[in-house]
Image (cartoon, helix red, strand yellow):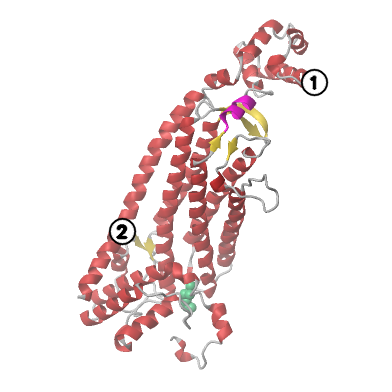
Amino acid sequence: MYRSRLEKNLDKHTLDYVSSISDDSEIALYDIIGSQAHSIMLYENNILSRAEVKKILSALEKIKKENLSAKSSAEDIHELIETLVIKKTGLEVGGKMHTARSRNDQVALDLRMKIRDDINVVCTCILDMVETLVVLAEKHTATAMPLYTHLQQAQIGTFSHFLISYSDALLRDFERLYDTFGRVNHSPLGAGPVGGTSLPINRNSTAKMLGFSGIVENSIDATSNRDVVAEYVGHIAILMTNLSRIAEDLVIWSTSEFSFVELSDQFSSPSSVMPQKKNPDILELTRGKTARVIGSLVAILSNLKGLASGYGRDLQEIKPSVFFSSRTAISALVVLNSMFATLKVNKQKMNQIADSGYLAALDIAEALVKEGLPFRSAHKIVGNLVHTAHESKISLSELTTSEVAKSVSSKEFDAKKLGKIISSINAESSLKNRSSLGSAGISEQKRLITKRKSKIKQYRNNITRRSAQISLAIERLSSNVRTLCR
Ligand code: ARG
């Protein structure tokens, strides 16, 4: 349709190479709605007549119901939709729809409309998963389990503490995406190919009709930059990285060696050959898909870094990376949410491991600090105790008085008293005494949970309000379209 300057049609194989039509199904509806807003604005500014806008809007309404995925010789969805409008209304009318715009501002518009909707969906899925985590945490505020550093046993903790740590990371993902929405929600429409137009258009009017909070003002910036797209995919990549780490914890905890948790059969895979297997494939795929989303971010940044200002066709290649990232993040959140909701927690095993080994070492050292010892001396004494216990292959609580006496000189601390301190400390007492802000202590778990619950409520309201603003604008536009189609 656009080839008047060129003598020959695009080579068939080459059309496949340059066409984005299959990826564009994700933005087809946005392109139609954007075209309706643009046409109404052209009518409001006397560029289209009442009869012309009626025909164009009616044609676009019909196209909404058509299957646009069919093979076509169009290079992209913008060409296809304009061709269909011209087919339905004739060149005299349909040929006016593309007045004062370009595919360059059009695709930038479609992408921003798609991303702002995706942000709202991803944010809602994040809140759903956080809610599941918090509900589960509430059941496990007193479920003791070991905490790890270097994947070596570190301190006595609670399962709830782990779950809240996941919630907090996900709430930060929410906040990042929520902020980005503010930068995405500006309309590039009317920027034209790169430098604007001499025709009397009203960019603020189309922005308002489409529910944007404003316009991307500079027409070069509006058409040729995709930094907010990179920002969005960057946040999705961070979100996926968080999910991937959570997945890794579950992989470890569901091994026979740990058996802290058991995945529901619905979320496990068998082996084709070993009849006993119950594999955490879904969690492994979350790790694997995260790698691809990170790849998408790298692809976008690499695409952008060498581009001269002004639209370059390279930008077309950014779209599938965005669509893949959104799809992956939404599915990962939905699947992991269900996995947590159906997770079997082996409380007994967790408690038993938390009470064994040398996990109470720091609690014992802190008890000595409370008795007036410098921390460094306490660290040395308890280090000696652990050494002795390890040599005898026993736990700290199994040390005899004489073994305790071997680890501490009477000058440093009374061995008998030390023995009493050791036997008074277990997982339960440790979690009762742990009181610092954000610690694994039981009282802290309750406070953390209450705070997260009210955050979820507040964040849900924010997202509902935002989604409603977009829906309201689109509904108003639809009713405007209906009126003009009469
Ligand atoms: N299919 C293109 C894209 O997705 C649309 C813009 C094409 N613009 C152009 N001047 N060739 O980016």
For the residues bearing labels 2 and 1, Cβ distance under 8 angstroms: no
Label 2 sits on residue? 471
Mark 1: give few (<14), some (14-19) or many (20+) Cα within 10 Å.
few
Q: Residue at coordinates 31% horizontally, 72% vertically from top-left? A: 36
Q: Secondary structure at mark 2?
A: helix
The magenta segment:
346-354
Q: Quadrant of residue 52?
A: bottom left
Q: Secondary structure at mark 1?
A: helix
Query: Considering only order in the chain, which callout, 1 or 2, is on the residue closer to the N terminus?
Result: 1
Q: Residue at coordinates 56% horizontally, 29% vertically from top-left? A: 347
Relative vertical location of residue 302 with respect to residue 360 in this rendering, above or below: below
Q: Quadrant of residue 259?
A: top right
Q: Main secondary structure of the magenta part?
A: helix
Q: Quadrant of residue 473?
A: bottom left
- In the displayed orientation, state which residue is furthest to the right: 391
Identified by mark 2, the residue type is: Ser
Residue 468 visible in the snapshot: yes
- In the displayed orientation, state which residue is furthest to the front: 275
Identified by mark 1, the residue type is: Glu
Residue situated in front as seen by the camera: 122 or 332:
332
Q: CA distance from mark 2 to mark 1?
A: 69 Å
Mark 2: give few (<14), some (14-19) or many (20+) Cα within 10 Å.
some
Q: Does 217 appear in magenta?
A: no
Q: Is 197 placed left or right of 418 in the picture?
A: left
Label 1 sits on residue? 391
Looking at the picture, how far across and down is residue 388, in whole percent?
Answer: 77, 18
Q: Does 348 appear in magenta?
A: yes
